[in-house]
Amino acid sequence: MIQLYIPLNFLGVIYREIKQGLTDVDRMFALMDRPQEVADAPGAPPLAGLERPVVRFEDVHFAYEPERPILRGLSFEIPAGQTVAVVGPSGAGKSTLARLLFRFYDVQQGRITIAGQDIRSVTQESLRRALGIVPQDTVLFNDTIAYNIAYGRPGASQAEVEAAARAAHIHDFIASTPKGYATLVGERGLKLSGGEKQRVAIARTLLKNPPILIFDEATSALDSANERAIQAELRSAAQGKTTLLIAHRLSTVVDAHEILVLEAGRIVERGTHAALLAQGGIYARMWALQQSGEAAVAA
Ligand code: ATP
C-alpha cells in the first residue's frame, strides 16, 4: 500500500504544480531529484537587482550523503554578463553546481549569492525565474512544438515563439514539417534528434530571457557540424548574460572569462584558456589530448 501510495502522491504533486502553472521544466526536475523540501525562509523577499547580476560561490561545501563530500570549499565569481566555464572529469561535481544554484539542495557550508543576496534568503519562485538552463538532456512534453517552446514563457504569442525558434535555428526544421508549430513531439509524437531537442531547449530559454544562464553541455557528442552550430547559438544566447557553462568539450570554453578545472570537488586550476595553456598543467594536457583525439577522428 505504502509503495503504491508514494509514487501516486509524487505524481500528484507534479501534476498539481503543472496544473497551477507554478512549475517549469527545471522545477519538475527539482521535484523528481529532490529528497526533501527546501523551504522558503519565513517572509523571504523576492530576488532583486537582476539587471546584471553577479553570481558568487563562497567556500561552498556540499555532500549528497554525509560520508561522501562532493564539493570541498569552492569559491568563484561569475561577473555580471560574463561566462565562467567549468571543466573536469566525470563525477567531479560540475552538474552539482547547477543543482545548487537552482537550490534543489542547500549547501552545507559557505554560501551562494546572486546580486549580493544569499539564495537561501529569497523566494525559490523568484530565484528560478531568474535562471534559465539548457540541460544535458532536454525533456519534451507530449504536446505541440509550439507548446514546448512557449513553456519558457507561458502566454507568449506565436510571433514570439517563432522569433525564439529562429534565433535557435530550429524554425526552418519546424516549418518543414506538415503541421509546423502544431506538430506533436515527445514520446508519442515526432521524435527529434539530440541536436533538435537542444535547439528547442535553447529557444525555450531565449523566450524565458532570464538574466542568468546555465548550459550543461551534453556528454554525448553531436556530429561536428551540429556541434559547431549549437555552440554558436549558445554563444549568442549568452551575450550579455551571467553564464555558467558546464563543459565536456574544451572547444566550447575557449572564450570564457574564466575556466575552472574541477577535480574531486576542488578547483585545481583556474584562468583564461591562454593562461591555462601557458601554465602547462592539467588543462593543457586535457587540451592536447582532445586536440589529438579530434585530429584522429578527422584523419
Ligand atoms: P559528468 O561530467 O559525468 O556530468 P559531473 O562532474 O557533472 O559529472 P555531478 O553530476 O555533479 O558530476 O556528480 C558528482 C558526484 O555526485 C558523482 O559522484 C555522482 O554520482 C554524485 N551524485 C550526483 N547526484 C547525486 C544524488 N542525487 N545522490 C547522491 N549522489 C549523487
Image (cartoon, grey):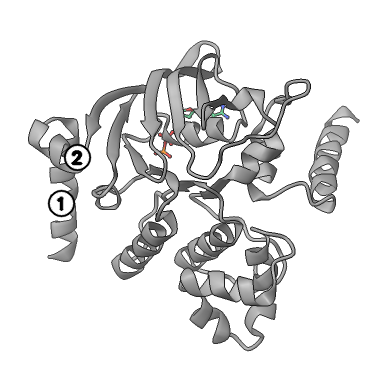
Instruction: Report whether residue 265 is seen.
Output: no
* Amino acid under disc 1: Gln
The answer to whether residue 296 is above or below residue 75 is below
The C terminus appears in which quarter of the rendering? bottom left
Camera-side residue: 208 or 81? Answer: 81
Label 1 element class: helix
Residue 237 picture location, percent across and down? 44, 59
Q: Is mark 2 within 8 Å of ligand 1?
A: no
Q: Residue furthest right?
A: 1
The answer to whether residue 36 is above or below residue 72 is below
Q: Which residue is mark 2?
A: 286
Label 2 element class: helix
Residue 222 picture location, percent across and down? 37, 62
* Rendering quarter of residue 145: bottom right
> In this image, 293 relative to 107: left or right?
left
Q: Which residue is mark 1?
A: 291
The answer to whether residue 106 is above or below residue 11 is above
Residue 110 picture location, percent across and down? 49, 15
Residue for point 35% across, 67% down: 229
* Amino acid under disc 2: Met
Camera-side residue: 111 or 146? Answer: 111
Q: Is mark 1 within 8 Å of ligand 1?
A: no
* Rendering quarter of residue 64: top right
